[in-house]
Image (spheres, rainbow, N blue to C red):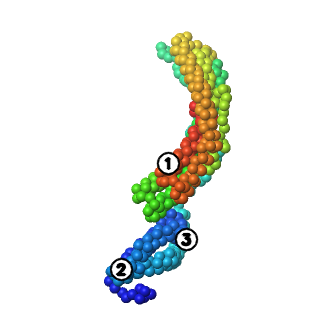
């Protein structure tokens, strides 16, 4: 106003009011962007100021320029009423020019000073914070830190820790201990008594009689049966080991793939955060409608929720894996296929499940022989010292054989043992047929999934990643609208997730081939 030779008036005061409103609004736009960048993780103050100023300079300049150009005709007007209009326009145009420069220069400087003052205050309490954190870390009641394992290490830990392996090994030890007790000679009996007492007779007194029963004909059969029981228990140990290994492999694959899905969502979340920010910038610049901005914001928040869900799924999968490995919490590291093998063969000889059922058939065969041996004769030998009246020095010796004359009970038990053997054989044949049929189906599924994974790795995944990059860049440059961005990104994200689903299915099928029907 001094440059133009004008004095302060009511219209000039109104111009100052307008000027203050626009200047404060521009300052708020700039400061809000600085704060949002800080929340997004940009901790470097200088970089935050440069990025925020570069992103907000266009809406600030557009606001100021539009107002100045709007008031320009009033500033140069010479028509009736110009003496009222010129002071108002002069204040607004000159004030917006200087206020815009101050907004882009002074406000960032003041913001940087204010942030550094916060850091100085923070440094005063930092040592106490560090002490508190160290105290919490060293507290014994704190949760165990997560440890990294690959699949091979996980299998070793599971075999050492999980109780089912110990129980199976104790069963073998029990059967081995029982072997020492099958060669039983027989019981030993001690007795004493008197005969022919009364009617004036001296009587015969047995001072001590020892009788040894000899059940020796069935020893060989009982030994064979117990040896087969030990072999069956050893087959059960191997079956338990493979069942445990299969469970650990499945849990490891699930945790590994869930971790990969979580990382996919982390990348997509970063892209959608930039998408939301770009939409906000376009909305501030009035390039898109508020509805479009809300849609972009909603989609970004949905991805954040999906990311949190994926994180929760990963933590649950880690706990599921850790339950097999001990009291610590274990996370997967390397890809599981490095420690898995594909078994493609028509032979089922090496399958732990068929081995176990085959051993049960052999045990049932030995059971038939064992029941038959129970009807074999047993022997006894008896000797003792006797006294006739008052005369001692008499001895007695007896030997005999026990033969089961009524064999109906023994024959019934033998028939039951034969039925038990037939049941074991039927179970073995059922398991063999089931495994053979399932293996053919699993092999076909494995081949199909292998082809699918090759397609994803060679074609779909590279295309999806290019889509992600292209869609983000195109939206920021204005080459596509928000609908096109969302559709393209949705297709790319789904491709990534479908790949990891197919990858998990392939590995689970590979596990089924390695451990069929366990």
Label 3 secondary element = helix
Tag 2, which secondary structure?
Answer: loop
Question: Looking at the image, which residue sits at the far top?
Answer: 405
Q: What is the crowding at mark 1: few (fewer than 14 residues within 10 Å), some, or many (at least 20)? A: few
Quadrant of the rendered structure where residue 358 is?
A: top right
Mark 2 / mark 3, whichever is N-terminal = 3
Circle 2 or circle 3, nearest the eye: 2
Residue 500 versus residue 298: which sits nearer the camera? 298
**Is 483 situated above or below 435?**
below
The front one of 195 and 183 is 183
Please tell me how crowded label 2 is: few (under 14), some (14-19), or many (20+) other residues with Cα within 10 Å: few
Left or right for 198, reference 232:
left
Could you tell me how far apart the alpha carbons at marks 2 and 3 are, in whole angstroms?
Answer: 45 Å
Q: Which residue is mark 3?
A: 50
Tell me how many marks there are: 3
Q: CA distance from mark 3 to mark 1?
A: 32 Å
Q: Nearer the viewer, residue 52 or 412?
A: 52
Q: CA distance from mark 2 to mark 1?
A: 57 Å
Q: Earlier in the sequence, mark 3 or mark 1?
A: 3
Q: Nearer the viewer, residue 93 or 380?
A: 93
User: Label 2: which residue?
Assistant: 79
* Mark 2 and mark 1 residues within 8 Å of each other at the beta carbon: no
Query: Which-is-in-front pick, marks 2 and 1?
Result: 2
**Mark 3: few/some/many CA within 10 Å (<14, 14-19, 20+):** few
> Residue drawn 60% across and 34% down?
448
Across and down, in percent, residue 406 comes to: 53, 11
Q: Which residue is mark 1?
A: 487
Q: Residue 404's spot in the image, x, y percent?
A: 56, 13
């Amino acid at each position: 106003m001094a440059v133009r030779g004008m004095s302060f008036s009511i219209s000039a005061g109104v111009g100052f009011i307008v000027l203050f409103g626009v200047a404060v609004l521009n300052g708020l736009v700039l400061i809000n962007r600085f704060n949002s960048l800080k929340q997004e993780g940009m901790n470097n103050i200088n970089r935050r100021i440069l990025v925020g100023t570069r992103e907000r300079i266009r809406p600030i300049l557009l606001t100021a320029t539009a107002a100045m150009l709007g008031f320009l005709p009033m500033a140069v007007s010479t028509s009736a009423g110009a003496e009222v209009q010129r002071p108002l326009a002069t204040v607004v145009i000159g004030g917006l020019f200087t206020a815009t420069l101050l907004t882009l220069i002074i406000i960032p400087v003041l913001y940087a000073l204010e942030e550094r003052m916060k850091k100085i205050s923070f440094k005063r309490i930092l040592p106490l914070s560090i002490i508190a954190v160290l105290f919490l870390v060293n507290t014994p009641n704190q949760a165990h830190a997560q440890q990294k394992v690959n699949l091979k290490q996980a299998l070793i830990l599971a075999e050492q820790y999980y109780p089912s392996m110990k129980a199976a090994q104790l069963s073998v030890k029990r059967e081995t201990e029982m072997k020492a007790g099958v060669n039983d000679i027989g019981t030993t009996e001690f007795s004493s008594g008197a005969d022919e007492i009364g009617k004036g007779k001296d009587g015969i007194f047995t001072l001590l009689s020892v009788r040894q029963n000899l059940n020796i004909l069935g020893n060989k059969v009982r030994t064979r049966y117990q040896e087969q029981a030990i072999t069956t228990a050893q087959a059960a140990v191997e079956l338990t080991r493979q069942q445990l290994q299969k469970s650990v492999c499945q849990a490891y694959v699930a945790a590994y793939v869930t971790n990969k899905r979580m990382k996919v969502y982390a990348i997509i979340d970063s892209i959608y955060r930039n998408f939301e920010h770009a939409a906000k910038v376009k909305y501030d610049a009035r390039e898109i409608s508020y509805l479009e901005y809300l849609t972009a914001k909603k989609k970004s928040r949905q991805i954040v929720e999906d990311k949190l869900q994926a994180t929760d799924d990963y933590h649950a999968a880690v706990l599921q894996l850790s339950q097999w490995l001990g009291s610590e919490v274990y996370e997967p590291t390397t890809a599981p296929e490095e420690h898995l093998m594909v078994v493609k063969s028509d032979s089922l000889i090496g399958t732990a499940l068929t081995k176990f059922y085959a051993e049960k058939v052999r045990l049932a065969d030995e059971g038939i022989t064992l029941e038959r041996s129970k009807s074999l004769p047993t022997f006894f030998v008896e000797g003792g010292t006797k006294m006739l009246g008052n005369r001692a020095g008499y001895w007695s010796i007896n030997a005999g054989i026990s033969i089961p004359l009524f064999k109906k009970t023994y024959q019934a038990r033998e028939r039951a043992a034969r039925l038990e053997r037939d049941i074991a054989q039927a179970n073995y044949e059922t398991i063999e047929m089931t495994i053979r049929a399932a293996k053919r189906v699993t092999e076909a599924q494995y081949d199909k999934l292998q082809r699918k994974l090759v397609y994803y790795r060679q074609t779909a995944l590279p295309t999806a990643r290019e889509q992600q990059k292209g869609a983000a860049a195109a939206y920021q440059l204005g080459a596509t609208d928000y609908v096109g961005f969302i559709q393209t990104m949705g297709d790319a994200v789904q491709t990534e997730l479908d790949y990891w689903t197919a990858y998990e299915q392939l590995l689970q099928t590979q596990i089924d081939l390695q451990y069929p029907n366990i």
